Image: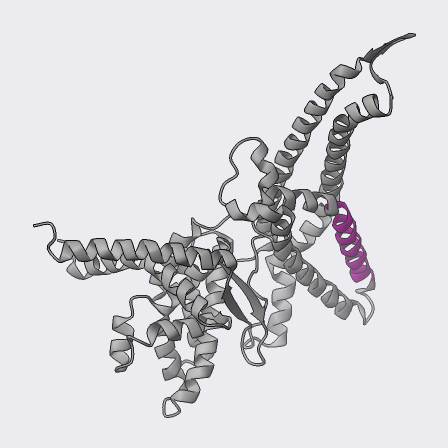
Amino acid sequence: MIDIQETHKKFRKELSSGTVSLALLSILAQTKEPLYGYQIGKLIGSPLGAGDAKAKTDSVTVKQGAIYPVLRSLEAQDLLSSEREMTDSGPPRKYYRVTESGKQALMDWTEIWNETKTFVDNVLGGDYQ
Amino acid sequence: MKTTDELIQTYLDDLKSALAGADKATVQDALADAEEHLRTALESEKADQEDLAENEVIKGVIQTYGEAEEIAQAYLSWEQNLPPALAATPAARRAAGSADANSKTYPGFFGVFADPRAWGGLVFMLISLMTGILYFTWAVTGLSLSLGLIILVIGIPFMILFLLSVRGLSFLEGRLVERMPRRASFTDNSLGWMERLKQLLTGKSTWLGLLYMLLMLPLGIIYFTVMVTLIALAAGFIAAPVAAIVFNVPIEAISYGEIIWYIPDYLTPLIAVFGVFLATVTMHIARWTGKVHGRFAKALLVSD
C-alpha cells in the first residue's frame, strides 16, 4: 500500500528542489547586506509562519536545515560567495552574498520560473479540455 | 534532563550516523552548518522566549531545523552537484581569469588551459617543494626534540605544543588543498583539558597529519621536478623557431661523432607545435595530479 503521507512528502521535496535555489538567490539579491544561514531561514519561514508555532513547522516548504546544502551548492556554482566571521559567543558564521553571475542566473531563472508557472496554471486552469 | 549542549551533540551524532558512508567533506559541511545554525538560533531565540527553559528552546530549534535523516538526504542529493577536490580555490579561479564565464565544462584536449583546476594544480605542484621542505623540517625537528626532551620537565609541554602545531598546519593545508572552506575547528567546551589532551595524543588526525607532513617532502620533490622539467622542455620547444630564425642559432638534431645534422629553419615551427602539445599535456598532468593529491590529502587531513 502506498502511504499517502509519503507521496505528499515526496512531491513536496521534488517541487522544492529547484524553487529553493531560486528563492535563496532572490532573497540574497534583495537584501543589500550579506546574510548567514539562520537569518535566511527566518526570512524564508516568516511569510508563512506568522501564525502559531505549529503552522510554522508544518507549512514551511523547506526545513531550515535543508537551506544549507543549497547555499553550499550555489556557492560551488559561483552564484554565491561567502565569508566566515568570528563571533564572540558560539561558532563562526558564514555570510553569503550574491555574485555577478548569481544576479545573471537569477534573471534567467525568474524567466524560467514564469514560463513554468504559466504552463502549470494553464494546465490546472483547464486549458486542455 | 539533558543540557542544551548534550541535545545539540545528540543531534549532531544523529546527523553523522545518518550520513554514514557519505563523502567525508560532506559530513563535515553538514555538521558545521548544523552546529552554526543550532547555536546561533539558540542565542537569538533565547532572548525572544524568556519564559521557556533553555533546553525547551533548543528542542524547538532542532525541530525547525529538520530531522537528521531528512537533512542528511538533502546533503546527499546536493553532494553530487559539488565539484571535486582542488576544484574551485579562489587562487585557481583568479588564475583562470576570464574563463570563469563558462566554468562548467572544459571539453577537448586544449580546453584544459581554461580550467582553473589545472592552473590550481600547476601552482600547487610548483610550491609543493617549498611547503614539503617546511613541513618535513618542522615534523622531524618537533618530533625528535619532543622525544629527546621527554625526560626533562619541559618535554611534555613541548610535545603538546608541537602536536597542536601539527593539528593547526594540517587544518591549514586541508583548507588549501581540499574543497574549502571547511569546518572551523571550534573546540568542544564540554570536555575537560585532560580529555582534550587525550584526544590530541590518541586522535588519528594528529598522527595522520604528521604522516602527511613527512610525505610532503618526497612528494614535493617529485611534483616540483616533474613540473619544472616539463615546463622547461615545452618552453624550449616553443622557443625553437625564434632561436633558429630570429637569432640564427642552429638546432642540432643528430650528432654522430664529427657528423652533426641540423634541422633546417623551415622545419623548426614543427618543434614549436610539439612544444604546444607538450605544454597541454603538462596542464593535463597538473590537473590530474591535483585531483589525486586532493584525494590523498582528504584521506589524511580531513578527519571524521
Task: State whether residue A84 is above or below residue B46.
Answer: above
| x and y percentages locating residue B239 in the rendered image | 78, 28
Question: What residue do we see at 57% from left, 49% from top?
Answer: B299
- In the current view of this chain or complex, which residue is farthest to the front? B246
- Residue A60: quarter of image: bottom left
- Between A86 and B112, the one nearer to me in the picture: B112
Colouring method of the image: one colour
| Left or right: B302 in relation to B36 | right
Q: Is residue B183 magenta?
A: no
| x and y percentages locating residue A10 in the rendered image | 24, 57
Task: State whether residue B51 is above or below residue B251.
Answer: below
Task: State whether residue B237 is above or below residue B1.
Answer: above
Q: Is residue B17 visible?
A: yes
- Between B233 and B156, the one nearer to me in the picture: B233
- In the current view of this chain or complex, which residue is farthest to the bottom? B51
- Residue B281: quarter of image: top right
- In the current view of this chain or complex, which residue is farthest to the right? B258
Q: Is residue B19 visible?
A: no
Q: Which stretch did the figure color magenta?
A: B128-148
Q: Is residue B138 magenta?
A: yes
| x and y percentages locating residue B114 in the rendered image | 59, 41
Q: Magenta-highlighted stretch: main secondary structure? A: helix
- Between A51 and B242, the one nearer to me in the picture: B242
| Left or right: A63 in relation to B216 | left
How many marks overall?
0
| x and y percentages locating residue B283 in the rendered image | 64, 36
- Between B120 and B102, the one nearer to me in the picture: B102
Which quadrant: the N terminus of chain B? bottom left
